[in-house]
């Protein structure tokens, strides 16, 4: 029960450290006040511009996902080839799983469109 000491002792702060900490806290509080007081509401010019930007971003992201899927598909093919050469069944299974996952990732956009129906 000697570990239940409820007295907490603060670490000592020297003069420069205390002054620096106070200045840091003052700057953080000032920045937070400025950020919260001087906010403006931004309205879009028209809905089509925002929708076009979202569609372009979606196309870019799905392009990246397709590239990652193609890389995984290629890696799966290499793993299957190496497993056939070395007669390693566990590597062959991992290769087929990587190949299947890469194909699914490559065609993720088309799969989502089939599910959604658009």
Image (tube, grey):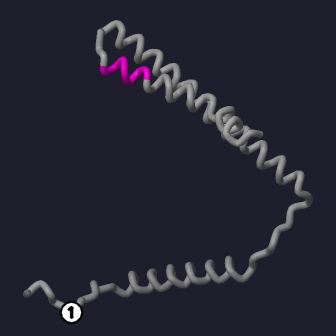
Judge from the rendering whether residue 111 lies leftward or rightward of residue 10; answer left or right: right
Q: Mostly what secondary structure, the magenta segment?
A: helix
Q: Is mark 1 on a helix, strand or loop?
A: loop
Front-most of residues 104 and 48? 104
- Quarter assignment of residue 96: top left
Judge from the rendering whether residue 9 lies leftward or rightward of residue 66; answer left or right: left
- Quarter assignment of residue 69: top right
Image position, residue 75 (x, y; %): 47, 21
Where's the C terminus, which quadrant?
top right
**What is the number of callouts on the image?**
1
What is the span of residues highlighted in magenta in the rendered image?
90-96
- According to the picture, the residue beneath numbered tag 1 turns out to be 7
Front-most of residues 19 and 51? 51
Where's the N terminus, which quadrant?
bottom left
Image position, residue 50 (x, y; %): 83, 54
Judge from the rendering whether residue 77 lies leftward or rightward of residue 1; answer left or right: right
**Residue under the point 46% across and 21% down:** 76
Image position, residue 12 (x, y; %): 28, 86
Please determine whether, in this image, residue 90 is positioned above or below residue 48: above
**Residue under the point 65% across and 83% down:** 33
Front-most of residues 25 and 58? 58
Please determine whether, in this image, residue 18 is positioned above or below residue 76: below
């Amino acid at each position: 029960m000697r570990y239940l000491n409820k007295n907490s002792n603060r670490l000592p702060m020297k003069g420069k450290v205390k002054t620096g900490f106070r200045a840091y806290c003052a700057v953080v509080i000032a920045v937070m006040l400025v950020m919260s007081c001087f906010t403006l509401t931004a309205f879009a010019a028209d809905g089509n511009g925002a929708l076009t930007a979202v569609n372009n971003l979606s196309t870019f992201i799905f392009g990246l996902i397709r590239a990652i899927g193609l890389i995984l598909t290629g890696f799966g093919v290499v793993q299957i080839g190496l497993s056939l050469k070395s007669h390693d069944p566990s590597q062959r299974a991992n290769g087929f799983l990587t190949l299947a996952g890469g194909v699914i990732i490559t065609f993720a956009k088309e799969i989502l469109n089939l599910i959604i129906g658009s």
